[in-house]
């Protein structure tokens, strides 16, 4: 497949490596542009093509948006203008109000993180790859059927788009679990039982059912937000 990745941080870098190892054609962008040292190094390591953000959005069949939540509104307003409606957009983001993002009113008022992202992008999204550490995403994929294979939840409203993501998750070595619609994606947000726990498929399904929609205080903004991950505010 032809895949564009917007964001070359921990998750974006891990996905770039994994997709390239499988032979997918990857175009990757960051906020500093294709000539930046970090992007050039990632391209050299993986064989991915360094591009601009707009070029990544037009790279092919799948676009992964994997940037901090606070930076979503910095993306170009016309990012997806002219992009075919059947291009699948994956959102890997998490809202860390006290640690990084500060207050985002739409999410604080009850929107799921990915519903808010979808509204900002003007495109439907599939939420995936948000509940696993980047190092584990990079290194802990296993062949299908292996005992203890880590499972990842995938939420989205379009069955065809979700099916594409389910296949990609399986290809890179994880059991895909359908986690429902985007409005149910709160079940895989930070603070829920499935977040950062490396469960197998049975465990993921159980954890999704055990999740509660109330966002704990650790995951809600305060008047002093944000601090940082060492000293949340």
Image (cartoon, helix red, strand yellow):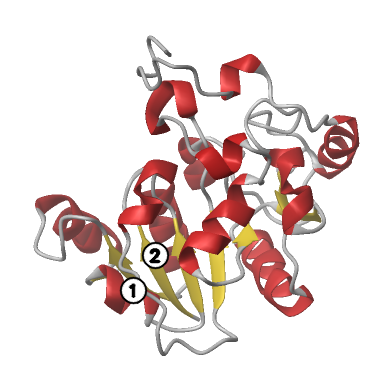
Can residue 128 be seen by looking at this rendering?
no
Does the CB distance between marks 2 and 1 fall below 8 Å?
yes
Q: Which residue is mark 1?
A: 56
219 over 198 or under it: above or below: above
**Disc with the residue nearer the chain's start (2 vs 1):** 2
230 over 139 or under it: above or below: above
Residue at 55 percent across and 62 percent down: it is: 119
Picture coordinates of residue 139 (x, y %)?
50, 42
Which part of the image, by quadrant, shows the C terminus?
A: top left
Picture coordinates of residue 207 (x, y %)?
84, 33
> Could you tell me which secondary element the residue under label 2 belongs to?
strand
34 over 161 or under it: above or below: above
Mark 2, other Cα within 10 Å: few <14 / some 14–19 / many ≥20 = many
User: Could you give the CA–CA distance between mark 2 and mark 1, rounded to whole angstroms?
Assistant: 6 Å
Residue at 60 percent across and 46 percent down: it is: 113
Question: Which mark identifies residue 5?
Answer: 2
> Could you tell me which secondary element the residue under label 1 belongs to?
helix
């Amino acid at each position: 497949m032809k895949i564009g990745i917007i964001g070359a941080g921990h998750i974006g870098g891990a996905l770039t490596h994994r997709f390239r190892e499988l032979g997918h054609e990857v175009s990757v962008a960051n906020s500093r542009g294709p000539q930046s040292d970090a992007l050039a190094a990632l391209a050299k390591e993986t064989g991915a093509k360094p591009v601009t953000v707009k070029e990544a959005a037009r790279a092919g069949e799948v676009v992964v948006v994997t940037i901090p939540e606070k930076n979503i509104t910095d993306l170009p307003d016309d990012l997806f203008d002219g992009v075919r409606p059947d291009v699948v957009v994956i959102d890997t983001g998490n809202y860390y109000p006290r640690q990084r993002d500060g207050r985002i009113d739409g999410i604080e008022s009850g929107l799921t993180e990915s519903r808010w992202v979808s509204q900002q992008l003007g495109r439907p999204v599939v939420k995936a790859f948000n509940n696993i550490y980047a190092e584990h995403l990079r290194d802990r994929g296993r062949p299908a059927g292996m005992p203890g294979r880590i499972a990842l939840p995938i939420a989205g409203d379009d069955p065809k788009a979700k099916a594409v993501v389910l296949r990609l998750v399986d290809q890179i070595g994880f059991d895909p679990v359908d986690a429902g619609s985007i409005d149910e994606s709160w079940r895989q947000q930070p603070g829920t039982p499935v977040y950062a726990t490396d469960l197998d498929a049975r465990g993921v399904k159980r954890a999704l059912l055990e999740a509660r929609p109330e966002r704990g205080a650790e995951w809600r903004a305060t008047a002093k937000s944000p601090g940082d991950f060492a000293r949340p505010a």
